[in-house]
Image (cartoon, rainbow, N blue to C red):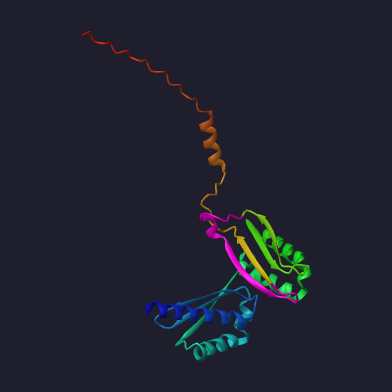
Amino acid sequence: MEERNIVKFKKEEFAIKEYIKESLGKGKISKVKIAYTPVGEKIIISTNKPGLIIGRGGEKIMELTAILKTKFKLENPHVEIDEITEPEFDAQINADEIALSLERFGPLKFKVVAYRTLQKIINAGALGTEIRLSGKLPGSRAKSWRFAQGYLKKTGDSAKVVDRAQARAQTKPGTVGVKVSILSPHAILKDKINIDEKLLQTLKTNFEAPIKEEKPKKKIKKLKSKK
């Protein structure tokens, strides 16, 4: 019984997030988080376009709050905006932008769209990025294309700090899947070694230090006792 309630709760939470993303529009929202407090439900919307989400005088926020109360039966929802200051390092925003560009210009220009986005992310200072497009590009048969540049680890602890996202583009030939992975320059890598003056001086000292040769120990022969 408890498992069913958990599944039902998660399904309702997922429905709320999907509704917010669809109602506010593709390419405007990165993530939606829901936090439950004693006062009510706190809904945090991460976006790089806070003005479009809030609306004039906060009318869109008020409208969204009213719908969450009536449609999803939330007691006291409180919507907060988390502004993304560096959208170039957000995988979801870039994936949505690629999907919107494919829907607007068509799938024939997928290479131009992918390379433009890739160069924009790298020029912003990202350590590495990867873009994968799969679908009917450019012919009638489905195919997968990969565009990558920089350092991007896929296994181990370093892979956990990579931001990944997916999006779908509805084009005339069919659906195109978009996957974006970005390694931000602010990510903490445990296997990264910074070579500075202190490290170079330590290596130089250890290299120049004389190596002491150990003299071989003399073997002491044991005298056999005569019986």
Decide which of 34, 134 is in the foreground and name it. Answer: 134
16 in relation to 223, above or below? below
- Horizontal and vertical percent for residue 197? 56, 41
Name the residue at the left extreme. Answer: 227
Decide which of 164, 172 is in the foreground and name it. Answer: 172
Residue 25 in which image quadrant: bottom right
Left-right relation of 37 to 195: left
Residue 171 in the magenta stretch? The answer is: yes
Name the residue at the bottom extreme. Answer: 70
- Horizontal and vertical percent for residue 195? 57, 44
Quadrant containing the C terminus in the rendered view: top left
Residue 85 in which image quadrant: bottom right
**Total numbered circles:** 0
- Horizontal and vertical percent for residue 70? 51, 91
Q: Residue at x 61, y 66 (%)?
A: 91
Decide which of 67, 54 is in the foreground and name it. Answer: 67
Q: Residue at x 39, y 81 (%)?
A: 38
Highlighted magenta segment, given as a residue range? 152-175
224 in relation to 153, above or below? above
Quadrant containing the N terminus in the rendered view: bottom left
Left-right relation of 43 to 171: left
152 in relation to 209, above or below? below
Q: Residue at x 71, y 60 (%)?
A: 119
Decide which of 78, 111 is in the foreground and name it. Answer: 111
Left-right relation of 200 to 99: left
Q: Residue at x 54, y 60 (%)?
A: 161
Left-right relation of 128 to 204: right
- Horizontal and vertical percent for residue 5? 41, 80
Residue 167 in the magenta stretch? The answer is: yes
